Image (tube, rainbow, N blue to C red):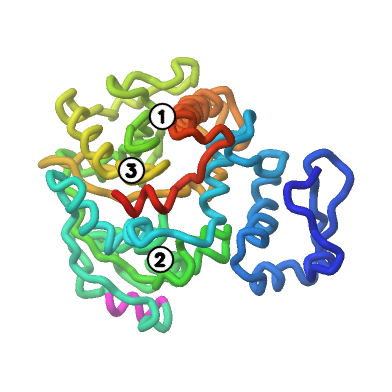
Amino acid sequence: MRDLPIPSSSPVSTIAQPDDREGGDVRRSDIGWADFRRLAPPTRAFNHLIAGQHFDERFGRWPLPPEHPDALINDVIFAAMIEPHWTPLQLAFVDKDTAKAEATRLAPTLRMPDTLAVIPMDAVASPDDLFARLRPFAGMQAVAKPSQASGAVTFLRDLSSADDVRLLHQLAATDYSGVMREMQYRLLPGKVLVEAMVPTATPAPPDDYKFHCIRGEPLVCQVDHGRFGRPWSRLLRLPDFAPMDPDDGLVPPGSLRLPAPDRIAAMIAAARALAAPFEFVRVDLYDGADGIYFGEMTFTPAASLGIAPSIEGDHALNPTHHVYSGILMRALRRAWAADGHRDGAAVDDPQRVAAA
């Protein structure tokens, strides 16, 4: 049974029709689908239809309601990202530029990478134009990155031509609400953020510690090591940073150095403070040589399509992902039960966020 019926009177019915298999499917014509995705209004129903295609391709089924007993954390993230209404606090954290002020307010002990420049993309005509604006920072220990997206981090110490910033230009100018219907990015102005690099004890960039939090409680941390060389990731339990799934088959590289216990405790405390207003959020922190640095806040990691790292890879659901999802979903269901929501609850309750 399809989660979202398509009325025969809908303009969608001339482009996509369901088949009979369990869970539903949509057969898209090569002509018309791209235009439909671009022109369909940003309502929850249309967002469900468009983004649900990608979810189905990834997991072999359409998204389940978050309260469904078989729902994964991916279903919860999907329900959040197609929601058109986001609070001002959430939107402030979505933009890496404005997020710093909010992070300082909630976790004043955190360090912030120094902002060297903010370049509005509506004033940038081309990759060559962006290169010209970044050229004064060439050779510096600094990075340029989109303020509203992950990826395309450009190390300005190596900047030499417009080719170095073509991907950065592309991502910074992209409206991500039109890619996977992540509505928090809708109408968010594109910017390139130029930041001083986080200081480290080695020449390598700092490791990234991503805390997955439910109702302000960090439950799992993913460490990303060697992000711009030979990347390695693993999910860790809290508070001891032991492997979340001892059977994930992953072997730590010899270059990995986990933080000292007091630094881990400080990271957990900072993540708890930042996540307190939200039902679910991922808090990214950097382990710098002189302290813990704020990275970003992510409400819809991997646009609901992420799979936990394991030796089996991330091309399909694996046992490690079920362990990870189970930890988060049990915490969510306990919170919903405590609230008296027998049928589940909204992922980011605007009243709860506004009251924070």
Identify which residue is drawn at 18% across, 45% down. 107
Q: CA distance from mark 3 to mark 1?
A: 16 Å
Is residue 229 depicted above or below 158 in this figure?
Answer: above
Q: Is residue 69 left or right of residue 84?
A: right
Q: Which residue is mark 2?
A: 168
Identify which residue is drawn at 28% across, 78% down. 133
Percent position of residue 127, x then y:
41, 76
Chief SS of the magenta region: helix
Q: Which residue is mark 1?
A: 234
Q: Evaluate if marks 1 and 2 touch, with contact meaning CB atoms under 8 Å apart.
A: no
Q: Quadrant of the N terminus?
A: top right
Identify which residue is drawn at 29% across, 74% down. 119
The numbered dot on residue 283 is 3
Q: Is residue 211 left or right of residue 65?
A: left
Assign a secondary structure to mark 1: strand
Q: Residues within 10 Å of mark 1 (few under 14, many from 20)?
A: many
Residue toward you, 190 or 7:
7
Q: Evaluate if marks 3 and 1 touch, with contact meaning CB atoms under 8 Å apart.
A: no
Provide the residue span drawn in magenta. Answer: 127-133
Residue toward you, 247 or 304:
304
Q: CA distance from mark 2 to mark 3?
A: 23 Å
Q: Amino acid at mark 1?
A: Arg
Q: Is residue 173 left or right of residue 14?
A: left
Residue 165, quarter of picture: bottom left
Q: Is residue 85 magenta?
A: no
Residue 161, quarter of picture: bottom left
Percent position of residue 324, x then y:
48, 27
Mark found first going from the N terminus, 1 or 2: 2
